[in-house]
Amino acid sequence: MALRPDLAIIADAVPSSARVLDVGCGDGELMVALRDKGVDARGLEIDPANVTAAIARGQSVVQGDANRDLADYPDNAFDYAILSQTLQTTERPDLVVGELLRIAPRAFVSFPNFAHWRVRLALLWGGRMPVTRLLPVAWYETPNIHHVTVSDFRDLIGAKGIGIEAAWYLSGDQPTSDAAASWRAEHAIFLIKRA
Amino acid sequence: MASALHHISHQSVTIPTPLPLDSGQSLPSVTIAWQSYGALNADKSNAILLCHALTGDQYVASDHPATGKPGWWARMVGPGKPIDTDRFHVICANVLGSCMGSSGPATPDPVTGAPLGMAFPVITIGDMVRAQAMLLGHLGIERLHAVVGGSMGGMQTLAWAANYPERLERALVIASAARHSAQNIAFHEVGRQAIMADPDWQDGQYYGSARAPTKGLAVARMAAHITYLSEEGLTEKFGRRLQARDIKSFGFDADFQIESYLRHQGLAFTDRFDANAYLYITRAMDYFDLADPHDGRLAGAFARAKDVRFTLVSFDTDWLYPTAESRRIVQALQSVGAAASFVELSAPYGHDSFLLDVPALDRLVAGALGSGF
């Protein structure tokens, strides 16, 4: 089964034999891919059905909430933390990013870019909160409580003095350039590094 | 009758070396009764030790010799089942202090030949595990694929991971806790007092007499049984329905179905369990606090266990060993860097959920044992 493109990028970028915490690991799809390349991956996931599915696949996953339960992990417990498509659902994304870089010196953070041109157009012409491929749920029931753009994230990282080691931008599952990412990227993946 | 219970023969071994106990006393030798299911492979690497709960026994997946009923986890253990005996050699030993063939209060005094009764030393969960380790030594099994247990079996599993981390690869702990809470101790004390207040208890020396404290033991079981169920489950199963009658009797018969059910559960229990064993095992559970030797820091107990893969499961309706207790264990494991899985499953049956039909648990167990992919 092919991995979601953003997960494939992360799976590719994590060195084998690394120790990884996948925060919001879902049913363990990325963890299985990481295990297959020799990565020691652990997961945190809020939905018990997903946790059950991941454990049934032989993965080590703890049911928990990224807003609260990251505090249980010791400093530097991992080489990498991964937060994929989850940042925009957290109560305080800034604090969560801080926790990720406490637990691990490096973290992958991926999120849908709210400044993608389709979103901009929908808002500009429709005057309504956009519903797109990566943001498929209406405003009143979306789990995305902190919509974020590529520029917003870069600003947050800059303000916190965090380094960006690499970034990938996807438009329709195809890579897009750094320069045009703000409006062309549907989806951004950052590899950030503790200051 | 308890006396009939002690005439059943069990597969057992008597190990002639002394068993040191946490109390500072020791047993000069120890008898351990056990059952096994599935074949042990040539390199002895496929053994799973299954630890039973307070009133459980080694008859996990075979008919109970006293009641004739199917084993207590026959739905989980067997060929093609989540604990697959086509792949694994599953061992379950009757715990130390119990009444199905292992050393306990009914064991004869080596000098007088009379049952020890209350002269049997108070034992702990750690002692039970030490006795199991002796059995595995006798069987020549150095390392276990997994230790698995629910409720008190989960406590033994945790003690295995804490005390013998090099001897197990996986620990699967279901509906359990790393310590007994004040509420847990309180319920056990009610049960013990019911037994000891029964005149037929006779200070524990009832084995040779025609009387046994079956009334006290039945009441103990009734009180405990309530703690194994959820309010929701009781309401659904019994509500306020009357038992075999249309109107209230205005007396003290079992008017309500729940009363009749509990009385039946209490009485049936006395056919398969010994009152003194109930005293000793509940005491062992009450003394259980894995953090105790580590200044109250649970993580200290797991300092050597970071290479064990842990899976913990709780149930949302279990108020006896609630989810918070499992979370506490998970936090301690995470702080030492052990690979830990944890999930709270939704099931209506309270603490007893681990014994009942919860399909998600089956998938979890298979996955945690490395056979779910």
Image (spheres, rainbow, N blue to C red):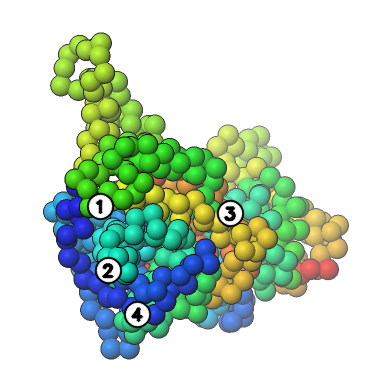
For the residues beneath circles 4 and 1, the answer to whether they share a chain is yes
Q: Residue at x 55, y 42 (%)?
A: B182
Q: Provide the secondary structure element on which disc 4 rests.
A: loop
Q: Chain of mark 4?
A: B
Q: Which residue is mark 2?
A: B33
The CA distance from mark 2 to mark 3 is: 33 Å
Three-letter code for the amino acid on which mark 1 is drawn? Tyr
Subunit of label 2: B
* Amino acid type, label 4: Pro
Q: Earlier in the sequence, mark 2 or mark 3?
A: 2
Q: For the residue labelled by badge 2, is the local secondary structure a helix, a strand or a loop? A: strand
Mark 1 / mark 3, whichever is N-terminal: 1
Query: For the residue marked with disc 3, what is the amino acid?
Result: Arg
> What's the chain of the residue with tag 3?
B
Going from N to C along the chain, the mark reached first, 4 or 1, is 4
Which of the 4 image quadrants contains residue A12? bottom right
